Amino acid sequence: MRAKPEHIRKRYAFLGSFGITAIIFTFWLGSFSSFGFASQNAVAIAVNKAGTPTQSLVASVGSLFNDVKELIFGAKKITYSSVEVLPGNK
């Protein structure tokens, strides 16, 4: 490839970059058709799960209080019942 004339090397570079760009563009266009229906279904499922705005707000506030309670008084607190002392090297 290095032995080829410069105009041939430029042609190969252009064709290579054009081919890569075409592949990326094809995948980009393909993502629109599959993304459209999936996102509409996902939004509909999320809206059905959320219920009314009041239910969603009450659930999130309740969840916040539970998280704060577990943070302060939760079972994640570590308690040591015995301590073992071993001799160390000086």
Image (cartoon, rainbow, N blue to C red):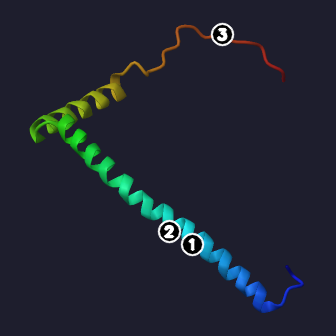
Identity of the amino acid at label 3? Glu
Q: What quarter of the picture does the N terminus occupy?
A: bottom right
User: Where 85 falls versus 45 (above or below)?
Assistant: above
| Nearest to viewer (mark 3 / mark 2) | 2
**Image point (71%, 85%), residue name:** 11
Rendered image: mark on residue 25: 2
Quadrant position of the C terminus in the picture: top right
Instruction: Label 3: state its secondary structure.
Output: loop
**Residue at 49%, 65% in the rendered image:** 26
Which of the numbered marks, if any, corresponds to residue 21? 1
| Marks 1 & 2, CB-CB < 8 Å contact | yes
- Type of amino acid at the residue the image marks with label 1: Thr
- State the separation of the CA atoms marked 3 and 2: 66 Å
- Tag in front: 3 or 1: 1
Q: Earlier in the sequence, mark 3 or mark 2?
A: 2
- Identify which amino acid the numbered label 2 is placed on: Phe
Residue 47 on image: x %, y %? 19, 41
How crowded is the residue under tag 3: few (<14 C-alpha within 10 Å), some, or many (20+)?
few
Q: Is 74 on the left or on the right of 88, as rendered?
A: left
Give the structural element (helix, strand or loop) at label 2: helix
- What residue did someone put label 3 on? 84
C-alpha distance separating marks 3 and 1: 66 Å
Residue 4 higher or lower than 41, as above or below: below
Residue 41 vs 16, above or below: the answer is above
Q: Earlier in the sequence, mark 3 or mark 1?
A: 1
